[in-house]
Image (cartoon, rainbow, N blue to C red):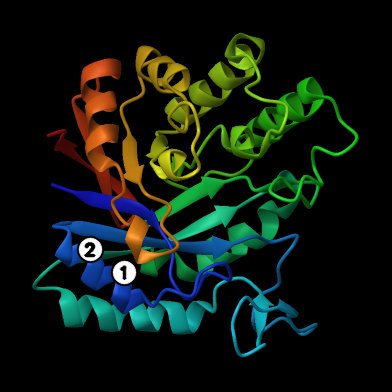
């Protein structure tokens, strides 16, 4: 079984790759299953039907068109997913997911969103892309804070949000802040206790974590999350783990999966990984 459980298409505002192009690529590289997880980031993005409208930015294209800054167009997204499932269902299993870029102060709209579409969802990623509506990739969150401060605040906000929000499947790219830390790698031992509390909460709630293979694309020195976090999760009794490329372009679909599987199996000691069906984990042997 080969399954990519973190990928994006034209319904994410940071991707233009068509859903069918991702699916055809998945078939070409021999995936058995793939789950689309397009972005929802309340606090910094609005829904397409928001009475205030959506924002637009200068587009990265030759036509000079503007690109939307918006969450998934849910009706069109789920409609197209069903079309794709019918069209390609004899060749690959296409699952329905979303990536929730959640914060403690945005729990309410995510709760409402999940309740609205819970019957249409197989899988939900719990991600944190910003704190206090300040994004990591721009450096706005880190600005004016020491490396110690922004690392601790990041993990504390994850734990705080996990304690009040439960409608998700796995924690995505748990140490995401590493990707945008210009000061270098913050020592694991300094945040081990708060990370252990996060993992303890996840295990208590029957939630999992993912290994996100975009760490190779971004040139990180370790996996994401790090081997130390993966090992800690396993040692604490964690069993639910998914593998996702975080591909926004079809070229990165399934990227470095063999490396990820080798690390999970031979370095960390996992014997299985998960796919999901209607928000329930399905276990498969790592091979």
Residue lying farthest left?
90
User: In the rendering, at what x and y percent does residue 143 appear?
Assistant: 86, 39
Q: Residue at x 66, y 19 (%)?
A: 186
Indicate the position of residue 81 as horizontal and vertical percent values. Answer: 33, 76
What residue did someone put label 2 on? 26
**Does residue 171 sit above or below 114 in this rendering?**
above
Q: Secondary structure at mark 2?
A: helix
Residue 145: image location, x then y, percent: 86, 30
Q: Residues within 10 Å of mark 2 (few under 14, many from 20)?
A: many
The residue at the point 66 percent across, 39 percent down is: 180
**CB within 8 Å, label 1 to label 2:** yes
Q: Residue furthest top?
A: 189
**Can the viewer see residue 124?**
yes
- In the picture of the structure, the residue carrying the numbered disc 1 is 22
Please tell me which residue lies in front, 209 or 175: 175
Residue at (58% x, 21% y) in the render: 195
- Residue sitting at x 46%, y 84%: 76
* Residue that protrudes farthest toward the front in the picture: 62
- For the C terminus, the image quarter is top left
- Judge left or right: residue 38 versus residue 80: right
Instruction: Count residues near mark 1 (Cα–Cα under 10 Å), then give few for <14, some for 14-19, many for 20+.
Output: many
Q: Is residue 123 above or below residue 71?
A: above
Q: Is residue 45 left or right of residue 6?
A: right
């Amino acid at each position: 079984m080969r399954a990519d459980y973190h990928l994006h298409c034209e319904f994410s505002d940071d991707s233009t790759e068509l859903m069918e192009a991702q699916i055809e690529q998945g078939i070409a590289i021999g995936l058995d299953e793939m789950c689309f997880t397009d972005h929802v980031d309340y606090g910094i993005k609005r829904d397409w039907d928001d009475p205030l409208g959506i924002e637009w930015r200068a587009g990265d294209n030759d036509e000079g068109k503007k690109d939307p800054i918006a969450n998934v167009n849910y009706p069109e997204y789920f409609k197209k997913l069903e079309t794709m499932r019918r069209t390609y269902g004899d060749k690959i299993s296409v699952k329905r997911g979303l990536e929730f870029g959640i914060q403690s102060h945005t729990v309410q709209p995510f709760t409402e969103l999940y309740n609205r579409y819970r019957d249409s969802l197989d899988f939900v990623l719990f991600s944190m892309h910003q704190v206090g509506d300040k994004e990591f990739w721009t450096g706005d969150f880190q600005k004016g804070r020491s490396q110690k401060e922004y690392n601790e605040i990041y993990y504390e906000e994850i734990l705080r949000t996990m304690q009040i929000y439960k409608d998700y499947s796995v924690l995505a790219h748990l140490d995401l802040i590493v990707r945008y830390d210009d000061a270098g790698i913050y020592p694991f031992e300094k945040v081990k206790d708060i990370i252990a509390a996060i993992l303890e909460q996840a295990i208590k709630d029957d939630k999992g974590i993912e290994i996100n293979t975009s760490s190779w694309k971004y040139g990180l020195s370790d996996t994401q999350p790090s081997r130390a976090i993966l090992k800690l999760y396993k040692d604490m009794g964690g069993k639910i783990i998914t593998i996702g490329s975080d591909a926004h372009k079809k070229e990165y679909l399934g990227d470095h999966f063999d490396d990820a599987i080798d690390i999970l199996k031979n370095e960390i000691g996992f014997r299985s990984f998960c796919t999901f069906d209607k928000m329930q984990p399905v276990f498969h042997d790592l091979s």
